[in-house]
């Protein structure tokens, strides 16, 4: 049986249809939307928390969405080992929900940044990156105003020691320079996973990079890894 | 009824990009005596509680659960009798 992907829709989500398109039409996976008031995830094998501006980013990005009815089910799903991918605002929601450590500040330059970026894959030891080599460079777009990842030194060391940093911003040659770190994130962090390695949060948008006509299809690499992994279960 | 005012500020150890930008603009305005700017949020809560202490506890719960993110923010609560 093929895996069932759930794409959560909050009021203000705007990458939900891109995510659905990438999964259902490009990757030919079985996907469905889940309204933020749904709570039954019993037939879901993979959860995608998409980008956007849930609840208008009021208070802090992700802070209100974190208390949507579906979120308690998402937390239970993740605690039981269910795979969860949070992209952009989805990453911010997972941070607010405590499924991933740290928080997001306004970009260092205070500007909303919408552009193509390069990411270096830092570990193949997650279901999201199993088929991507460590050190490989992907080109994915970003579009965010609050992607300046912050955490204290102890937590950063934990992330480094546990191999939880999954993607770092880099240049096209894979060098994690300061210039490549356009939003000011600590240690060039673009994506992290939890200790159990089943929850990934990332600011860049793989779902917007699944067709080469749109600039890059490197985002497919992540979905390929996930599909490969879920097929093997 | 009590009124709680909550000040939410970025933790001291965290660089405040908005404060930095505002400071830069103030310096350009000639207000060079201002040496630092930190920008936070002021939140007012009207609370129906039996005592000042009870109102404080409710405001504190609101802060830790939602209004502040303690990974990056500190909060300060003041309770006023209405």
Image (cartoon, grey):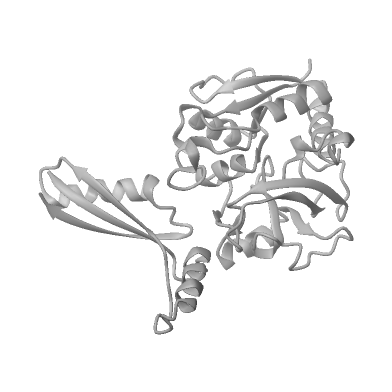
Disc tally is 0
Front residue (pair A57, A99): A57
Is residue A44 in sight in this rendering? yes
Is residue A27 in sight in this rendering? no
Q: Quadrant of residue A161?
A: bottom right
Front residue (pair A233, A73): A73
Residue extending furthest toward the bottom:
B33
List x then y, in percent, for residue A22: 77, 28
Viewport quadrant of the C terminus of chain A = top right
Query: In this rendering, would B68 be left or right of A88?
Result: left
List x then y, in percent, for residue A10: 53, 29
Query: In this rendering, would A147 be left or right of A59?
Result: right
Query: In this rendering, would B36 be left or right of A54?
Result: left
- Residue shown at 36%/50% (left/top)? B64
List x then y, in percent, for residue A70: 51, 27
Residue extending furthest toward the top:
A1
- Residue shown at 80%/21% (left/top)? A25
Q: Is residue B81 above or below residue A23?
A: below
Front residue (pair B42, B23): B23
- Residue shown at 66%/58% (left/top)? A159
List x then y, in percent, for residue B67: 37, 48
- Residue shown at 68%/26% (left/top)? A17
Query: In this rendering, would A134 be left or right of B11?
Result: right
Front residue (pair B26, A122): B26
Viewport quadrant of the N terminus of chain A = top right
Q: Quadrant of residue B37?
A: bottom left
């Amino acid at each position: 049986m093929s895996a069932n992907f759930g794409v959560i829709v909050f009021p203000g989500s705007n990458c939900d249809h891109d995510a659905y398109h990438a999964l259902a039409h490009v990757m030919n996976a079985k996907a469905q939307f889940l309204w933020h008031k749904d709570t039954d995830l019993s037939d879901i094998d993979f959860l995608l928390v998409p980008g956007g501006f849930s609840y208008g980013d009021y208070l802090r990005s992700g802070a209100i969405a974190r208390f949507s009815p579906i979120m308690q089910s998402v937390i239970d799903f993740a605690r039981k080992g269910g795979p969860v991918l949070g992209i952009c605002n989805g990453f911010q929601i997972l941070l607010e929900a405590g499924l991933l450590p740290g928080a997001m500040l306004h970009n260092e330059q205070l500007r909303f940044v919408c552009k193509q970026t390069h990411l270096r894959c830092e570990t193949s030891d997650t279901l999201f990156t199993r088929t991507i080599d460590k050190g490989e460079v992907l080109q994915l777009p970003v579009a965010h105003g609050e992607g300046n990842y912050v955490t204290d030194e102890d937590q950063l060391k934990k992330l480094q020691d546990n191999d939880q940093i999954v993607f770092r911003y880099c240049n096209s040659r894979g060098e994690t320079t300061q210039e490549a770190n356009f939003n000011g994130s600590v240690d060039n962090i673009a994506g992290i996973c939890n200790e159990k390695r089943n929850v990934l949060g990332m600011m860049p948008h793989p779902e917007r990079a699944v067709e080469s006509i749109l600039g890059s299809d490197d985002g497919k690499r992540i979905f390929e890894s996930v599909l490969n992994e879920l097929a093997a279960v | 009824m009590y009124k709680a005012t909550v000040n939410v500020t970025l933790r001291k150890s965290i660089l405040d990009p908005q404060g930095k930008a505002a400071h830069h603009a103030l310096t350009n305005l000639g207000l060079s005596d201002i040496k630092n700017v930190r920008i936070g949020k002021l939140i007012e809560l009207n609370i129906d509680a039996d005592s000042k202490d009870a109102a404080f506890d409710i405001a504190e719960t609101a802060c830790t659960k939602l209004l502040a993110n303690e990974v990056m923010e500190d909060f300060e609560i003041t309770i006023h009798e209405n």
